[in-house]
Amino acid sequence: MKMTVQKMRKLLEERLQDPTRKFIFDRDKSDLRIENIQNKKGVNISIPTVISKWNEKKEAAIDEIVFFVNEGLKAMNTEVALSGNEKNIYPVMRSTSHKTVKKDEVKLIYDDHTAETRIFYAIDLGKTYRIIDEEMLEKEGWDANRIREVAKFNLRSLPTPLKKDTVAENDFYFLNTNDGYDASRILNDALLKEMEDKVEGKLVISIPHQDVLIFADIKNDTGYDVLAQMTMSFYTNGRIPITSLSFDYEDGKLMPIFIMANNRPKRKD
């Protein structure tokens, strides 16, 4: 069966039907918004992205999206306090295209990271998390610096198990715990320094989506091709994509790079 935007829209609306919700469809973008009728808070879904995942995973892709929406709406509609939840605050990585202002015009707390990425901050709620905004800070008398310090401290306590794979003499290390903060480990300076000391070739890092971090020990031109293909595959199939570009890591700095057709990387200024 060929899945179309309209068929997928109907399928999602059936699975997500709830008397407290309404559906808003953007025909130009093929986006479906699931919104709480009372407070107007909601979640946007890209239908073409869901179809792409459905083509590969079938029903598992639908189950994943339904879970994501249900938990996301639950988090939005739950009162969450910062005080008392200090151990549950973490940084989360997003692309620079990610909105910095909520629909109700409340600004989210974020920091610039690279030309491709931004750092947001969240309270972990178990199965999901809630991005921290200025309204939450003002309500409890916190400031943004306190959020940054607590989040980065907690990040350093997260485990960093790596799985290694070798292709054409190039070594690739994957971090994929699915705790929601795999890509966030790119902010762990000690981990990056450890990997820089470990590699024999060039250290290149990728965070294609929220739930994976890739370290590549590039020893020849083929390694760049393999990493580019790998990163694009993860980026396309990830629930929350971040960037399909990789990063050179040198002297404590990350620099986004394009990997050209001739296998040679080109820095993105």
Image: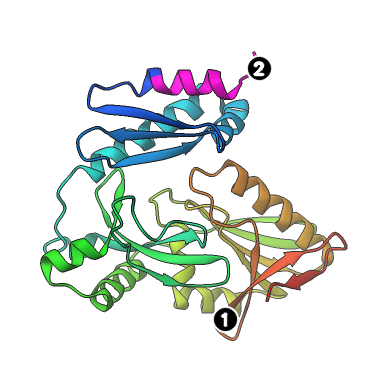
* Residue nearest the viewer, comparing 192 with 244: 244
Residue under the point 35% across and 24% down: 16
Main secondary structure found in the magenta portion: helix
- The boundaries of the magenta stretch are 1-13
229 inside magenta stretch: no
Task: Tell me if 84 is positioned left or right of 46 in this view.
Answer: left
**Image quadrant where one finds the N terminus:** top right
- Is 259 above or below relative to 28? below
**Image quadrant where one finds the C terminus:** bottom right
In the rendered structure, find residue 253 and report the number of the disc placed on it.
1
Distance, label 2 to label 1, CA atoms, is 45 Å
Q: Residue furthest right?
A: 262
The residue identified by callout 2 is 2
Q: Position of residue 34 (x, y in %)?
A: 36, 33
* Residue nearest the viewer, comparing 52 with 56: 52
Residue 166: quarter of image? bottom right
